[in-house]
Image (cartoon, rainbow, N blue to C red):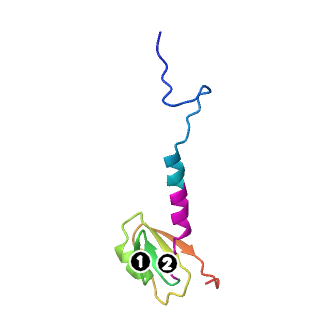
Amino acid sequence: MAVKRSYGADSAGNIPVSRGLYIFLFACLLLSAFFVPVSAGDVRIGANVYSTINEALSQAAPGSTIIVYGGVYPENIEITKSVYLAGVAAEDGT
């Protein structure tokens, strides 16, 4: 006869969520509430912030996602590699 191990499960088979997990989830939620987005007129690839779309394009690896925040970008761009552009509108709609 095989022994069934429960690893902390109750009689119904439910595994209790530890207090540490609740603290971790609360901390994640709290930190996400304090995230301050990059200012309008900035371009971002991951954690790197650029002031122009061309600068971001020149640094982007193929397959990168370039996040363009709302604003006016007085430049001509030519996309010569496979990248994704994602736009985030500013409060004034630009």
Residue at (64, 83) in percent of width and height: 93
Residue at (52, 46) in percent of width and height: 19
> Residue 70, position in %: x, y?
56, 81
> Residue 76, position in %: x, y?
46, 86
What residue span does the magenta drawing correspond to?
26-39
Q: In the rendered structure, does residue 16 fall within the stretch colored magenta?
A: no
Label 1 with label 2: CB-CB less than 8 Å: yes
Left or right of residue 80, residue 29 in this image: right
Mark 1, other Cα within 10 Å: few <14 / some 14–19 / many ≥20: some
Name the residue type under label 2.
Answer: Val
Name the residue type under label 1.
Answer: Val
Closer to us: 93 or 5: 5
Q: Is residue 94 above or below residue 80?
A: below
> Residue 39, position in %: x, y?
51, 82
Query: Disc 1 to disc 2, how far (Cα)?
Result: 8 Å
Tag 2 or tag 1, which sits nearer the N-term?
A: 2
Q: Is residue 46 above or below residue 20?
A: below
Residue wearing tag 1: 49
Closer to us: 1 or 10: 10
> Residue 58, position in %: x, y?
36, 76
Mark 2, other Cα within 10 Å: few <14 / some 14–19 / many ≥20: few
Residue at (52, 75) in percent of width and height: 37
**Residue at disc 1, secondary structure:** strand
Q: Is residue 61 above or below residue 93?
A: above
Which quadrant does the C terminus fall into? bottom right
Closer to us: 91 or 17: 17
Residue at (53, 70) in percent of width and height: 34
Residue wearing tag 2: 38
**Residue at disc 2, secondary structure:** loop
Left or right of residue 59, residue 94 in this image: right
